[in-house]
Image (tube, rainbow, N blue to C red):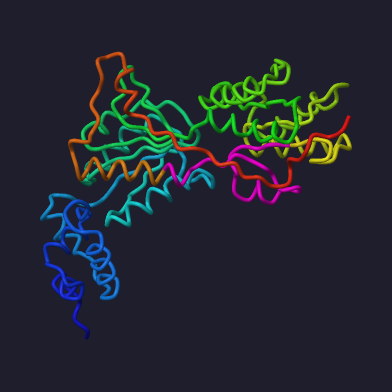
Amino acid sequence: MQRKATALDVAKRAGVSRSAVSLVLNGRGDGNVAKESQDRIRQAAADLNYSPNPIALSLRNQRTRVIGIVSDEVVVSPFDGNIIGGADDVARAHGFVTVVMDTERDASRDESAVETLLDRQVDGLMYVTVGLKPLDVPQGMLRVPSVLANCLDNSPAPRLHHVIPDEVSGGREATEHLLQLGHRDIAFLAGAATSPAVPLRIRGHREAMAKAAIPVREDRVFMAGWDINDGFNGAMGLLSATERPTAIVCANDRLAIGVALAAARLGLAVPRDLSIMGYDDESRIASTMVPALTTMALPLREMGAAAMSMLLGQIEHPAQRPTSGDGTGLEAKAGLETMVPCRLVVRESTGPVPAR
């Protein structure tokens, strides 16, 4: 039976000291070990199929190298599960594992989920939500390094860092894309008024129109809902009018499907007669539509990765943990927010403004 490789074997193969191997494979190489040496150590570990003993590590560092993740319904969602995927990628790359608990949108289970994870001695906690929303942070999250992804601390003086998409720039870039194609009469089908993302996306739309010196018609911007039938009904009203918009920005890709169905019902070709812009770049929807949907991609994996990197930084360097502000929440919030840009994905549903 072949002997299992040890840290000393890795050190000899990489031409470094055993302590250097320990620092790098425990995630503390930066600032202590030269990058070239770090690369050699990781390559040697891979060549020898070596991994640190997790029990020995936890005893030595008084850590379990386990991160607890609580979600409202991300685990059962085919969409925002990408946030957890991005977080898990970063955790595994640093020798941590993740344990996920889903409350299935039952806020009364938040505290018990957090306490269950704390009972298992997790090194840190992350809360992830489907859709941007304020969160009443479970008190247990304040006892260990913690971070929020796709949600915001709802307390008057926020204490936890949150990582969210830059919805204002997303709404702005969506409209700017249509303006660059020559469109001037652009409608905006927003989602539901209960979502914090909706006013931010509308604000971005208004900023783009103002920059182009084009007045926004108030009857062209309204709450429609989130589903296909909402997009269909909203578009039927817009497109049946004598003076119809040449382009419609939708607050999500399902609304865009409804708009495309309404256009087909009225005999309008996309994008020849009407350009349609989505939002989310939802898997198995945006790229498979006919025509394929131009959309703003939410940076889900990027948010998860950024939140996990921040959390691991707090674990390795406790001084990085945020503290509350002066009670107003303004000072604390200013340093507790990371916004990740959305990405424009141009496909076939948008084109030049049609000739009238």
- Is residue 58 shown above or below 112? below
Question: Residue 285: horizontal and vertical position, in percent?
Answer: 65, 47
Number of labelled discs? 0
Drawn side of residue 253 relative to residue 315, left or right: right
> Residue 140, located in which quarter of the rendered image?
top left
Q: Is residue 300 magenta?
A: yes
Left/right of residue 4 with respect to residue 154 in the rendered view: left
Observer-nearest of 202 and 113: 202
Query: Residue 83 appears at what percent x and percent y?
Result: 44, 45
Q: Position of residue 84 (x, y in %)?
A: 42, 47
Q: Of residues 227 and 109, which is closer to you in this image?
A: 227
| Residue ID at (45%, 37%) | 340
Say if the magenta span includes residue 122.
no
Q: Is residue 75 in sight in this rendering? A: no
Task: Name which residue lies at 30% across and 35% down.
Answer: 112
Question: Quadrant of the rendered structure where residue 328 is?
Answer: top left
Identify the image quadrant of residue 282.
top right
Q: Does residue 87 appear in the picture of this structure? A: yes
Left of 236 or right of it: where is 7?
left
Residue 181 percent across, percent down from the top left: 73, 36
- Find the magenta span and give its range: 276-303
Which image quarter holds the C terminus? top right
- In the image, what residue occupies the spot 72% across and 16% down? 217
State the quadrant of the N terminus.
Answer: bottom left
Depicted 220 relative to depicted 178: above or below:
above
* Furthest residue toward bottom: 1
The residue closer to the viewer here, 297 or 235, is 297
